Amino acid sequence: MYVIECADGTLYTGYTTDVERRVAEHDAGEGAKYTRGRTPVTLCHVESFDSKSAAMSREYAIKSLTRAEKERLIGDT
């Protein structure tokens, strides 16, 4: 599970088995539709999980946070 900051200052949260590859895909404009046109992106936060379901649950929880709460999370790492 990861959080990236887009060039326009927005935050994007996702999950993957290979964070470096996924961030490179976002940077190349091949990632999520949201990040296309908002490149370059910067990796801000990473969390590892033993299962896909745990990662997806955490992704959902982070996406539910306010911007201020996400910034605090990123600042704590």
Image: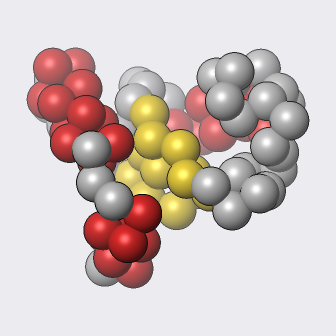
Residue name at image x 38 percent, y 72 percent: 68
Residue at 45 percent across and 41 percent down: it is 13
Residue at 60% x, 30% y: name it.
Answer: 22
Residue 19: x and y, percent?
51, 38
> Left or right of 20: which side holds 67?
left
Residue 4 visible at all: yes
Task: State the colouring used for the structure image.
Answer: secondary structure
Q: Residue at x 70, y 52 (%)?
A: 6
Question: Is 13 on the left or on the right of 34, as rendered?
Answer: left
Q: Between 72 and 15, which is closer to the camera in this rendering?
A: 72
Q: Is residue 42 visible?
A: no
Please count the marks in the image.
0
- Percent across and percent down for residue 58 are 20, 39
Task: Indicate the quadrant containing the C terminus: top left, top right, bottom left or bottom right.
Answer: bottom left
* Residue 29 to residue 44: above or below: above
**Is residue 71 depicted above or below 18 in this figure?**
below
Q: Position of residue 39 (x, y in %)?
A: 83, 45
